[in-house]
Image: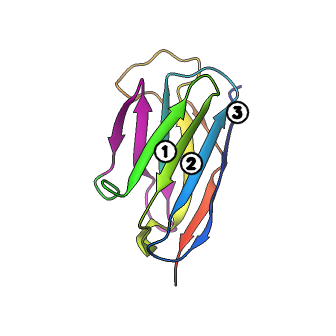
Amino acid sequence: QVHLVESGGGLVQPGGSLRLSCTVSEDYDIIGWFRQAPGKEREGVSCLRDGNTWFGASVKGRFSISGDNSKRTAYLQMNNLKPEDTAVYYCATNGHEILTGWCEPYTSWGQGTQVTSTS
């Protein structure tokens, strides 16, 4: 069983910054960040594969993703946070599974960390 642990969430004013971390217990090929707000569907935020990145349209220009495979840790840097960014943020990975797409599949998930941006 692959174990992922997110950290770094918290309460921040609009315009502020926050950095999330995701540490994975096993080797992986991809790391994805997702978020889910109350009453909304889960939304893809970002993905990292071999130094290549993808971002959802709502966070482009504000968020960045990085990782260190040797440490099995990925980061999501969130700048200029807005109230609509408020959600539980999850990281996910393929773990041991063979990749079936550019950033697929996601077979293991963390338990999430709360990010709240409000004044």
Amino acid type assigned to the residue bearing label 3 in the image:
His
Residue 76, position as x, y percentages in the image: 50, 48
Amino acid type assigned to the residue bearing label 2 in the image:
Tyr
State whether residue 39 is above or below residue 76.
below
Do tag 3 and tag 2 residues touch (Cβ < 8 Å)? no
Amino acid type assigned to the residue bearing label 1 in the image:
Trp
Residue 90 — which label? 2
Figure disc tally? 3
Residue at (42, 38) in percent of width and height: 47
* Near-viewer residue (38 or 69): 69
Mark 3 = which residue?
Answer: 3
Residue at (52, 63) in percent of width and height: 87
Query: What range is drawn magenta here?
Result: 35-56
Tell me if 29 is positioned left or right of 112 in this view: left
Mark 1 = which residue?
Answer: 33
Measured in 3D between alpha carbons, the distance from the residue under mark 1 to the one under mark 3, in whole angstroms, is 15 Å
Residue 6, position as x, y percentages in the image: 65, 47
Q: Earlier in the sequence, mark 1 or mark 3?
A: 3
